[in-house]
């Protein structure tokens, strides 16, 4: 039977809901089968209660620990802790690893607990919300958690929708219902939903709803917020269901007193809950590199431990076993001791892999994200919209962007549409060049004769208005009637004012323009549209609405006129409309010329056309349309096929031209990003001419660029084909990469291509068709001696190489514009550049058609514009204006990258310097796994003594300020090149740490040889050595971070001084006699600090050690800044250089100095006398000079 293919849901007494795979076809006989209906009553989905929390009282500790130990670093340190418990190999007390591990796990667990408690409270509040449900023929109040699939519910104004509900009826006319979807997609503007006409007429009262008996077939639960497909079978009639009939959970009812609905999906099956899953995790290049470096450190650790274990084996064989005073009575062989020594050194040297690294990185990223959120210079006051970092893991990647992929409309432009021009029957309107226009002063048209006119609408062609009001031209009448009828706009009456709510700004602008010219859209129902045509009202019966999508690029409506005539109106892009025009259509060429002119003026265009349909033709088509609309398998494809049948032999009326102005600051932003060596690609659905002219307006294209058109310039496509043929003729060179450049001309190049040419080049067809074609081509190529068609690839390898050639060609250009591209093509272009160039990419857009592109790029930026919040909800960063992108990248991105690189380099250095002292100490203790420091110093080194200064550098440091960062975009180049953190920098940090550890060990070691203190005691004991080495290390690493700090604040100064002070304070406490009395076995360095540090000789040793460690660093930094300065060094020197004023400025205002008149006489007489000033003057001379001076 069919039960294993279907999932049945049923709760309501007389309603059966069947959720089925879209590929399955349910027959009418199955629907009428009583057995299957009985089966439905026993199989039902879960209830409406939701559970978003992860833990409860019993599961929190084990589950949270399990999740944390899935991280490799935490698991590694847990294994170390287990090793330290084993007495035979334990060289450090267990608390040296336990304290940092518990600190890291505890901080993470507390954060998870706080988050989960908030989820508990939210779940409880939501599950206990109230709503009315139909039980026993009447509505009763119940909790949301008690709702079941199939329940009929009543929702009131300002109530949240409790589940995914099929709208049956509402208190508004025609079952219209307004919803706010802020919690669903972030948009605050109202959207409308509408019930079916049959349910609106028959399901208004309680008794009617109680008798409701229907079968609902629908898709399986999914996360597609923009799509729903279902069929309602009621009284042997099938009715198509789509998203316009659905009220989704999370929305709120607005402007509607009461509505009734049927629960389709409940609880975790609702679309909003299905969207609550994990999103694709994006990782930065530094993340990946850092992980590889940790693996490298671990490999070095194993090699060091293995070498030291071998050393201990030989040492014990030759020396240790023969020294009677080293006998421990264990009886282990030298090999066994070497094996145990290996694990002992794994424990000692484990700090080479820092446990606090990942926690510190997350803290720095969180702080950098807050700085972006708090940046007032990225705050858009007009819409009260601040910048928002929606992720905390990608900040430093903002400093490494190489390619930006930008949408045009709403991203580079304002997306505030204004109707500017139009062409009707070959005549262009909107230009003040008509002969009749001479009588008028060039001023906006006065629409005061139209009470519904929008006061903000401006139009300067008085001639068009006079033609409309004269009613002489029927084509003008059809033009504006089409604009007022062919749309999906909803209208709300607020007194005498009409408020239009449109799905897109273009559609709203066209309906508003028609309203101003006298064709006013008044209202609509499920099957009628009412408009005011100049001075009389007409109602048209809507027979079918063929909606717009990105593949069709057009929309149509079929109407029955009051006189019974049936007509199809269609509007869409010229590329698809011209393919469907009738051969007898007029004014095709003149309209095309006008379209080209509009595009050159950067106006957005739409073609308008119509077609009269006979009753017989419509009846035949309507049956196909009804069958396709209720199809549960491939409904969209079936509807598109049916739409194609009716949308042909159209008659052209004219075209519209809408203006969309550039946003403020776009040209300056693009110019600065270009100077930062960031290449910008614009991906848009507009015409080629429109996109190209916008490119010039925003300075993406400049006059000194050579523009290449992909589909027009033959050699561009020919070069791609020639490379493909060359690879075929050279089978051995299949893996060779051709290094010849595509563009040999000197100067900047730009590429302008269309979506059709992109499909041809990249073979982006249906996968099944492509596989079949490749299979046929491969067979033809192998069975025939003739070479294959050079335009077609013979296998997937050739297809990939052709794509790689295209990417190489495009990346040689300074700018690329792709026009007439679909959302899928946008994402494909981004993925190709990522795949073949290994570049860091950023996509920026403002609409739902940009979501795929935003998700595909390494970093996605959403602009909260006129097209809703879909792009923002899918983005990593969001703000209101394109111009803020330069600050996001050149300031925050660059700072974040520099700070993270500096943090990581220093972090690795300080841990190498700390850990490798144990390595050098091993050569003097028989490789016996003895530590060079006191145990508590090892425990607190990364936690208290050296963490805060480097953390503040990662949060606050900046080489130059924000103004200089924007003024000199070349400062961005090191991030693109990855020159501040790579394996070269890693090994420099390693060798720097080796040098520091050598100095910290051997200078005190040499100072302690044959030493006598002031009191006659020799301070050359192990504990005193450990104190001196630790003190030298702490002072060195804290002063080293001071040398690396470019931007000093009081906080940085306090952190450095405070870390050193904390070290000495904690050390004296730990080494005190009082704490030793309490825990004698834990604190064994009693009096070591006070005894050692009272010796001036040891203080001199510490100063000498620190000086020798820091002096080479100071010298190298001086040489680099003097001889090989970086771009940042040059900018800083430019900032610090004071401009000298010239001694004399010609043309300046003259002012006599009072100095000449106030100064007393000097020693000119003495100088002129010829006597030596150096001679001792006589008393008379001195007196004479004094008197002369007094006078």
Image: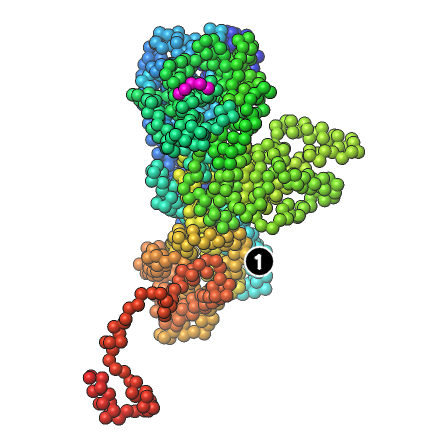
Picture quadrant where residue 968 is located: bottom left
Image coords of residue 185 (percent x, y)? 41, 30
Could you tell whether 442 is left or right of 813 in the image? left
Q: Is residue 254 above or below residue 991?
A: above
The range drawn in magenta is 469-473
Which quadrant of the figure has residue 751? top right
The local secondary structure at tag 1 comes to helix
- Residue at screen point 51% across, 23% down: 425
Q: Residue at x 61, y 29 (%)?
A: 765
In the picture shown, does residue 122 fall above or below 1084?
above
Q: Which residue is disc 1 drawn over?
A: 307
Q: Residue at x 49, y 50 (%)?
A: 676
Quadrant for the C terminus in the image:
bottom left
Locate residue 963, reporting x and y percent: 39, 53
Residue in the foreground of this view, choosing between 391 and 473 = 473
Per the image, is 472 magenta? yes
Q: Nearer the viewer, residue 821 or 1050?
A: 821
Q: Residues within 10 Å of mark 1 (few under 14, many from 20)?
A: some
- Find the residue positioned furthest to the right: 785
Task: Residue 43: give x, y in percent of width and height.
Answer: 47, 15
What residue is shown at x 42% (from left), y 40% (from top)? 663
Magenta-span inclusion, residue 249 = no
Q: Is 1034 above or below relative to 590?
A: below
Question: Which image quadrant: the N terminus?
Answer: top right
């Amino acid at each position: 039977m069919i039960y294993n293919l279907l999932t049945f849901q049923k709760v309501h007494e007389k309603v059966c809901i069947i959720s089925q795979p879209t590929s399955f076809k349910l027959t009418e006989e199955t629907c009428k089968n009583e057995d299957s209906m009985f089966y439905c009553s026993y199989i039902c989905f879960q209830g409406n209660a939701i559970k978003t929390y992860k833990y409860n009282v019993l599961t929190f500790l084990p589950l949270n620990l399990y999740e944390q130990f899935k991280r490799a670093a935490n698991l590694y340190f847990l294994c170390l802790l287990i090793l330290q418990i084993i007495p035979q190999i334990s060289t450090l007390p267990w608390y040296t690893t336990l304290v940092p591990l518990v600190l890291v796990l505890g901080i993470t667990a507390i954060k998870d607990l706080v988050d989960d408690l908030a989820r508990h409270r939210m779940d409880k509040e939501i599950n206990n919300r109230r709503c009315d449900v139909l039980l026993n023929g009447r509505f009763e109040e119940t909790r949301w958690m008690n709702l079941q699939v199939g329940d009929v519910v009543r929702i009131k104004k300002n109530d949240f929708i409790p589940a995914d509900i099929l709208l049956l009826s509402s208190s508004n006319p025609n079952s219209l219902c307004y919803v706010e979807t802020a919690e669903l997609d972030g948009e605050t503007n109202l959207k409308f939903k509408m019930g079916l006409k049959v349910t609106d007429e028959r399901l208004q009262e309680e008794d009617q709803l109680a008798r409701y008996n229907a079968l609902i077939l629908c898709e399986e639960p999914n996360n597609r917020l923009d799509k729903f497909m279902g069929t309602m079978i009621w009284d042997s009639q099938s009715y198509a269901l789509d998203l316009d009939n659905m009220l989704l959970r999370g929305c709120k009812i607005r402007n509607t007193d009461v509505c009734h609905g049927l629960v389709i999906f409940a609880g975790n099956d609702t679309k909003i809950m299905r969207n609550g899953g994990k999103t694709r995790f994006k990782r930065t290049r530094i993340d990946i590199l850092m992980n590889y470096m940790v693996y490298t450190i671990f490999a070095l650790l194993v090699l060091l431990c293995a070498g030291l274990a071998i050393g201990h084996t030989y040492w014990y064989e030759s020396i240790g076993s023969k020294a009677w005073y080293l006998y421990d009575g264990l009886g282990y062989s030298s090999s066994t001791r070497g094996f145990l020594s290996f694990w002992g050194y794994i424990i000692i040297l484990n700090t080479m892999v820092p446990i606090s690294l990942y926690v510190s990185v997350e803290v720095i990223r969180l702080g950098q994200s807050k700085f972006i959120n708090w940046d007032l210079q990225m705050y858009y006051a007009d819409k009260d919209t601040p910048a928002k970092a929606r992720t905390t893991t990608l900040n430093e990647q903002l400093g490494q962007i190489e390619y930006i992929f930008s949408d045009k409309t709403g991203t580079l432009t304002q997306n505030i549409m204004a109707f500017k021009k139009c062409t009707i029957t070959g005549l262009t309107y909107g230009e003040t060049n008509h002969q009749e226009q001479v009588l008028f002063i060039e001023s906006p048209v006065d629409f005061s004769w139209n009470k519904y006119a929008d006061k903000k609408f401006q139009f300067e062609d008085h001639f068009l208005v006079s033609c409309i009001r004269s009613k002489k031209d029927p084509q003008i009448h059809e033009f504006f009637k089409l604009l007022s009828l062919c749309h999906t706009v909803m209208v709300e009456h607020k007194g005498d004012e009409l408020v239009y709510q449109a799905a897109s700004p273009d559609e709203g602008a066209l309906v508003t323009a028609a309203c101003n010219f006298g064709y006013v859209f008044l209202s609509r129902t499920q099957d009628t549209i009412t408009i005011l045509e100049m001075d009389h009202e007409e109602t048209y019966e809507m027979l079918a609405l063929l909606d717009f999508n990105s593949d069709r690029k057009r929309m149509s409506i079929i109407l029955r006129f009051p006189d019974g005539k049936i007509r199809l109106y269609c509007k869409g892009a010229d590329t698809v409309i011209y393919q469907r025009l009738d051969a007898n259509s007029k004014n095709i060429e003149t309209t095309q010329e006008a379209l080209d002119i509009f595009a050159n003026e950067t106006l957005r265009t739409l073609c308008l056309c119509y077609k009269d349909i006979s009753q017989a033709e419509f009846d035949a088509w309507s049956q196909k349309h009804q069958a396709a609309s209720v199809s549960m398998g491939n409904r969209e494809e079936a509807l598109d096929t049916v739409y194609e049948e009716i949308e042909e032999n159209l008659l052209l009326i004219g075209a519209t031209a809408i203006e969309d102005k550039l946003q403020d600051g776009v040209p300056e932003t693009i110019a600065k990003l270009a100077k930062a060596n960031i290449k910008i690609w614009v991906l848009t659905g507009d015409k080629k001419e429109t996109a190209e002219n916008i490119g010039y307006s925003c300075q993406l294209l400049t006059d000194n660029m050579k523009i290449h058109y992909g589909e027009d310039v033959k050699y561009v496509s020919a070069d791609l084909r020639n490379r493909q043929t060359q690879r075929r003729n050279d089978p051995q060179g299949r893996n060779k990469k051709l290094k010849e450049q595509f563009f040999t001309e000197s100067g900047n190049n730009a590429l302008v291509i269309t979506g059709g040419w992109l499909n041809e080049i990249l073979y982006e067809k249906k996968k099944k068709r492509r596989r079949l074609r490749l299979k046929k081509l491969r067979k033809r190529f192998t069975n025939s001696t003739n070479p294959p068609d050079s335009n077609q690839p013979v296998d997937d390898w050739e297809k990939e190489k052709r794509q790689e050639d295209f990417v190489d060609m495009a990346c040689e250009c300074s700018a690329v514009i792709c026009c007439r591209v679909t959302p899928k093509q946008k994402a494909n272009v981004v993925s190709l550049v990522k795949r073949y160039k290994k570049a860091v990419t950023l996509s920026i857009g403002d609409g739902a058609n940009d979501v795929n592109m935003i998700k595909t790029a390494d970093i996605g930026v959403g602009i909260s514009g006129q097209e809703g919040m879909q792009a923002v909800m899918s983005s990593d960063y969001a703000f209101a204006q394109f111009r803020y992108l330069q600050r996001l990248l050149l300031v925050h991105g660059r700072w974040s990258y520099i700070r993270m690189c500096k943090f990581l380099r220093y972090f690795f250095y300080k841990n190498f310097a700390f850990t490798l002292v144990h390595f050098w100490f091993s050569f003097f203790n028989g490789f016996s796994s003895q530590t060079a420091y006191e145990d508590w110093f090892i425990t607190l080194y990364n936690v208290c003594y050296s963490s805060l200064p480097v953390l503040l550098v990662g949060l606050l440091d900046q080489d130059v300020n924000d103004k200089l960062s924007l003024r000199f975009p070349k400062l961005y180049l090191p991030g693109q090149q990855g020159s501040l953190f790579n394996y070269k920098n890693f090994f420099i940090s390693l060798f720097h740490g080796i040098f520091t550890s050598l100095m910290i060990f051997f200078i005190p070691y040499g100072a302690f040889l044959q030493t006598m203190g002031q009191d006659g005691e020799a301070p050359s004991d192990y504990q005193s050595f450990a104190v001196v080495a630790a003190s030298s290390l702490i002072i060195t690493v804290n002063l080293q971070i001071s040398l690396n700090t470019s931007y000093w604040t009081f906080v940085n100064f306090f952190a450095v001084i405070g870390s050193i002070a904390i070290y000495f304070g904690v050390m004296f406490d730990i080494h005190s006699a009082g704490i030793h009395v309490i825990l004698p076995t834990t604190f064994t360095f009693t009096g070591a600090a006070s005894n050692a540090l009272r010796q001036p000789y040891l203080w001199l040793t510490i100063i000498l050690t620190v000086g020798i460690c820091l002096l080479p660093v100071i010298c190298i930094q001086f040489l680099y800044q003097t001889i090989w300065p970086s771009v940042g060094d040059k900018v800083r020197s430019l900032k610090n250089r004071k401009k000298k004023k010239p001694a004399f400025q010609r043309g300046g205002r003259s002012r006599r100095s009072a100095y000449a008149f106030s100064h007393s006489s000097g020693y000119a007489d003495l100088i002129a006398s010829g006597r030596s000033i150096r001679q001792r003057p006589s008393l008379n001379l001195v007196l004479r000079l004094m008197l002369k001076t007094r006078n």
